[in-house]
Each structure stands twice: as structure tokens, then as C-alpha cells.
Image (cartoon, rainbow, N blue to C red):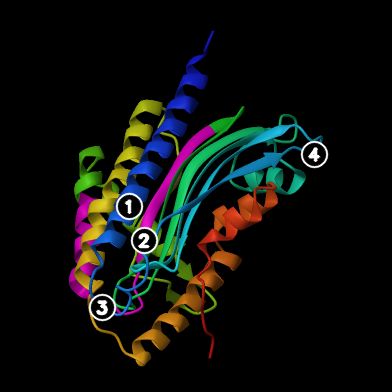
Amino acid sequence: MTTALEQERAQAAAWFHALRDEIVASFEALEDRQTTGPTAGLPAGRFEVSQTTRQSDDGTDAGGGLMSVMRGGRVFEKVGVNISTVYGDLGPAAQKAMAARGVPGMESDPRFWASGISLVAHMQNPHAPAVHMNTRMFWTPHAWWFGGGSDLNPCIEYPQDTAHFHDVQRAHLTPHGDDLYPKLKAWADEYFFIPHRNRARGVGGIFMDDRNSGNWAADFALTQDIGRAFLPAYVPLVDMRRDTPWTEADKETQLIHRGLYAEYNLVYDRGTKFGLATGHDANAVLMSLPPMAKWI
């Protein structure tokens, strides 16, 4: 008999997969719409899809997922949309990380289950903003929670684009509570700050982690709306900027900004650290890194 927990986990994993399919279709449609400009002569980009697998220390199955990456498209220089469902026992380092986050009992029972979607897009046109989005569910015998969010990372900021991105997120979050958008926006501002550069990596968005109100259905609905907000918040910005002429100076600005993004993901990002610490496919974990970057 399927337990309520198993049903919830299956429901969450199926949602992440459905969101992945919707985003992949939307991004490939963007590629088809790019019929003018310096990249119009390139083949319309398509995602290359590969299965990822993970094994426990004893060689048994420990989950996996789908890695979908498009490279060298008309609109996207590199974009990855990954989903995974992984499980097993957390190693000592990951157990300590969980204990530091207030999850008790991991030493005595280190089992875990996690599922989610993660997306990072790096653009051909420097005027079109890079973006990150993820949503996820995490379970241990001692606690469960949801997390996720999205943040906009333009190298050349347009205030109206920033306003649109935030307005759509606010509209999707407000039904869950008037205080939720301001709270998750402030959390994103804190989380996506780069201390060693004393600056934010982008113009913010929303972020949450450890979301457990005690009502699984309500927290899952919130997580779904964070995912649903992504395409209407982002795609209109790409459509608005993908035909904007750019200069070599603009491209230089983009490459330098990508260096900031790479620094953040390699030094601070929780998802990157967790993925590498738990033995997930390194190519999938590091999918977020830009194809080219520059430091001066």
C-alpha cells in the first residue's frame, strides 16, 4: 500500500518534471522566434537530454534525473534545465551540514530523499538577462521542507525589466500571504549577496529554504506558484531584449559579470555544495557555470 508520504513525494517529483517540460518547450520556442540579428543564421537551439544516475557507496541505486542542456543557440549561449530525484544515506559531511541547519538525529538515521528542478540560463545578447530558478523538496526521517526561488542576473540592467520580474513574483506569492513576497525578496537579497565582492550578484528575486509550516499541501502549493511565476516573469524580458544591438564593450561587460556568477556558485551556493557532497553527477551539478567568463 502506498503511504501518504510516498504519495506526497511522487506528487512533488511529478510536478518538477512537468515544470521542466513546460520550460524546455518555452525556451525552444524562443529559439524559433529569433529570426533577425547576428545569431539568426545559427540553427535554432535544442536541448540535449541525458540521463543522470547516482549510486550509493555499496553500488546500489540512489536515484538520478534528467540533464537538459542547450549550447550555442540563437538566444541562449548556454542554458540548463535539470531535474533529479535522489535518495540514500547522507555522508558525515552532509550530516554535519544538516545538524548545523537544525535537523536533529541525522547521526542515528542518515536517510534522505530529495527532488527538484534547477535552471540557469546564460544569454547570447548581453542586453538579455541571465537567470536562475529552482524549486525542491527535501525529506529526512526527522524533518521535511521545501525550498526554491528565482533571481534575475542582468549584466546591463533595465529598471523596467527588474520591476516586471518582481511584479510577477509578487502577484504569484500574495495569495499565500501579504507578507510573503517582501519576506522572500529580502531573503533573496541576503542569500545572493557576494561577501568577498561586497555586492549582489544580480537584481534579486525571491528565495526560501526550510519551508515547513506543518501543512504539506499549503507549502507545496506555494512551491508550485514559485515555479509558475518563472516563465511569465522572465520570457517577456527575453523577447524584449533579444534583438537589441550590442557592442564589443557590452560583451565584455557580460563576460566580467559572468565571473561574479561563477564565483558565487562555486563558493557559496548551497545546491552546488550539496550536489557535489552527495555524489550527484558533477556535470549536472556544475551545469550552472557560464560557457565563457572573464576576470580582470
Which portion, as a residue range, is magenta? 144-170
Q: Nearer the viewer, residue 86 or 291?
A: 291
Mark 2 against mark 4, which lies toward the viewer? 4
Image quarter hosting the N terminus? top right
Label drawn at residue 151: 2
Q: Say whether residue 281 is visible.
A: yes
**Which x, y percent locates residue 154?**
34, 73
Crowd tier of the residue under label 1, counting other residues whose Cα lies within 10 Å: few below 14, some 14–19, many 20 or above: few
Foreground: disc 3 or disc 4: 3
Disc 4 residue crowd, few under 14, some 14–19, many 20+, Cα 10 Å: few
Residue placed under numbered mark 3 in the picture: 37
- Identify which residue is drawn at 32% across, 90% down: 247
In whole angstroms, how far apart are the C-alphas of marks 2 and 4?
A: 35 Å
Label 1 secondary element: helix
**Are the residues at dot 3 and dot 2 in contact (C-beta closer than 8 Å)?**
no
Q: Is residue 23 magenta?
A: no
- For label 3, the crowd category at 10 Å Cα-Cα, with few meaning under 14, some 14 to 19 and many 20 or more, is few
Q: Residue 9: x, y in percent? A: 49, 27
Q: Do the CB atoms of the residues marked 2 and 1 lie less than 8 Å apart?
A: no
Crowding at label 2, few (<14), some or many (≥20) Cα neighbours within 10 Å? Answer: many
Could you tell whether 93 is left or right of 256 in the image? right
Question: Residue 168 magenta-drawn?
Answer: yes
Q: Nearer the viewer, mark 4 or mark 1?
A: 4
Q: Which residue is mark 1?
A: 183
**Which disc number belongs to residue 57?**
4
- Which amino acid does the dot numbered 1 rest on? Lys
Above or below, 30 against 126 in this view is: above
Seen in the picture, residue 154 relative to 8 is either above or below; the reply is: below
